[in-house]
Image (tube, grey):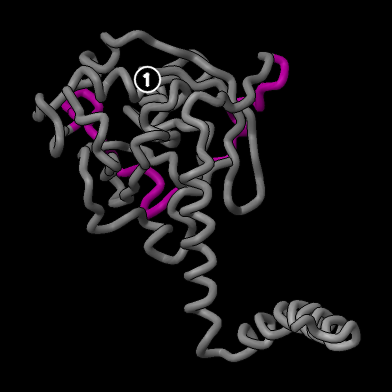
Amino acid sequence: MALPTDKREFKAASRRELLKLLPLAALGAFAVPKFQEPLLKKGLAFSDWMSDKCFRSHHLAPTFKASDLTPLDKFYVNTFDVDDPEVDLDRWSLAVSGEVQKPGTYNLAAIKALPKFAQNTRHICVEGWDVIGRFGGARLADFLAMVGADPHARFITVECADSYYESVDMATALHPQSLMCYEMYDQPLTRKHGAPLRLRMPTKIGYKQAKYLTTLTVTNVLSKVGYWEDQGYSEFYSI
């Protein structure tokens, strides 16, 4: 039997009032200290999951004219453990392992033998500043193809001479603008900018752009995500 009109209206009004109260209830939960950290972690995990699902692997980040470039001496540098880990540039090599057909060490000449790409793109720091720089190097996708990386693996991880470490999802690694950068402003990468090799991915936030690379691993399992991510920062952070 149908409810009388006044009862139906009462139930509808009750539902509306309940929906209005939900944001207040969520805000109230955040006010309870023991709930704050778990709620924030769940929210960040959901945001990373959504960003991963929405990532467009062939959508290009904006590129800019030469007149838009930030002068190299104005390109701000963040350091991690030390200002200069004093990499021996002449003896440097990148150790490659994991889900690859050709593990081993690769020197800079092997990476430079791959097609070179240069792009003027924006570098965005989580601290709030940004610059536009010119970056050159080999596509990460081309290097992964050269070493026979499993394209269905989930991640690449890198370790660095200054003890920094980072991971990148495979879709971002294979993005056409993701570079193994050995040049800036058409000159060899300087020590303070990560010589001899760094990551440059204009679809990612600044802390994903690891410098002073020493190892690269293709993997399906992360024992650690990245230095800042392991402190609670976003794992995906696409821009």
| Residue 48 vertical placement versus 91 (above, below) | below
Q: Quadrant of the C terminus?
A: top right
Q: Is residue 97 left or right of residue 203?
A: left
Which of the 4 image quarters holds residue 21?
Answer: bottom right
Q: Position of residue 160 (x, y in %)?
A: 28, 43
* Front in this rendered view, residue 99 or 201: 99
Q: Is residue 57 left or right of residue 220?
A: right
Q: Is residue 56 left or right of residue 224?
A: right
* Front in this rendered view, residue 163 or 104: 104
Q: Is residue 80 magenta?
A: yes
Q: Name the residue at 22% across, 51% down.
A: 221
Q: Position of residue 194 (x, y in %)?
A: 39, 35
> Mark 1 = which residue?
139
Q: Name the residue at 65% across, 81% down.
A: 26
**10 Å crowding of disc 1: few (<14), some (14-19), many (20+):** many
Which of the 4 image quarters holds residue 151?
Answer: top left
Tell me the kind of residue under disc 1: Arg
Q: What residue span does the magenta drawing correspond to?
A: 67-94
Q: Is residue 181 left or right of residue 93?
A: right
Residue 154 seen from this side: yes
Q: Name the residue at 48% across, 70% down.
A: 41
